[in-house]
Amino acid sequence: MGVAKAISWFCSPFLVPTIGIALLFLLSYLRLLPWSYKILVVLAVFSFTYIMPRLTIFMYRKMNGWTLREFGSREKRLVPYILTIISYLFCLTLLERFNVPRYMSGIVVASLLALVLCAIVNVWWKISSHMVSIGGAAGALMCFGELFAFNPVWWLCLVLILAGILGTSRITLRIHTLSQVLGGFALGLICAFIGILYFTL
């Protein structure tokens, strides 16, 4: 159980946009940009897609006196989704002001689209947001492989292995069922293609 919890924490959905932006700065032609600009953008994304959502959700949970276990129920997840969506909208607005490439903003667009769909699905069914994020990472790799004309197969294998470990952890912790895990991965994959390719082209 301890290992499963550690894996779930390490693969937090809130970290995916920051990791995606940072990797683009390190592995693409964007590495030629000044470090001051790269750090500013990464910190802005980290602030609005990780710190702000985590902070507002923590405050909301404490205000209601819910434990983490109680907070995991489907009925209590709608407001956290809304708080996160608002924070991601601020992030997208900020990236536009920084004039970052559209394919880079596409990472946040894909995440935002996934959040909106998760909030809608959550009305009827509890879907795994962790698996949505890892599915989005797999989709983003395929999208960027197409955009930059490189073969992402080894990176993709790594993400798929991580997805299997993460999905197993979520089921082991009895937070999600197999269908919720698979559904989350599929949703993230689709949102990545729509958010990155459609927004870029």
Image (cartoon, rainbow, N blue to C red):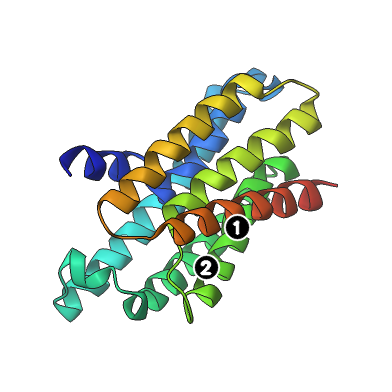
Image mark count: 2
The three-letter amino acid code for the residue at tag 1 is Leu
Seen at 58% across and 60% down, the residue is 114
Mark 1 and mark 2 lie on one chain; the one further toward the N terminus is 2
The residue located at (43%, 56%) in the rendering is: 178
Q: Is residue 109 left or right of residue 151?
A: left
Q: Amino acid at mark 2?
A: Cys
Q: Is residue 170 left or right of residue 122?
A: left
Can see residue 94?
Answer: no
Asked which secondary structure carries label 2, the reply is helix
The Cα atoms of the two marked residues, 1 and 2, are separated by: 9 Å
User: Relative to 131, does residue 25 appear above or below in the rendering?
Assistant: above
Residue 75's image quarter?
A: bottom left
Q: Is residue 143 left or right of residue 98?
A: right
Where does label 2 land, which residue? 118
Judge whether 104 appears above or below 96 on screen.
Answer: above
Give how far across and how far down residue 163 sits, in percent. Answer: 47, 39
As rendered, which of 47 and 174 lies closer to the eye? 174
Q: Is residue 1 above or below residue 152?
A: below
Q: Residue at x 78, y 26 (%)?
A: 148
Q: Position of residue 66 (x, y in %)?
A: 17, 74
**Quadrant of the frame with the N terminus:** top left
At horizontal 60% and vertical 19% (from top left) the residue drawn is 154
Disc 1 + disc 2, Cβ < 8 Å: yes
Picture layout, residue 127 above or below residue 24: below
The residue mark sitting in front, 1 or 2, is: 1
Label 1's element? Answer: helix
| Residue picked out by circle 1 | 187
Q: Position of residue 170 (x, y in %)?
A: 33, 51
Residue 1 appears in the picture as rendered: yes
- In the picture, the disc for residue 32 is none
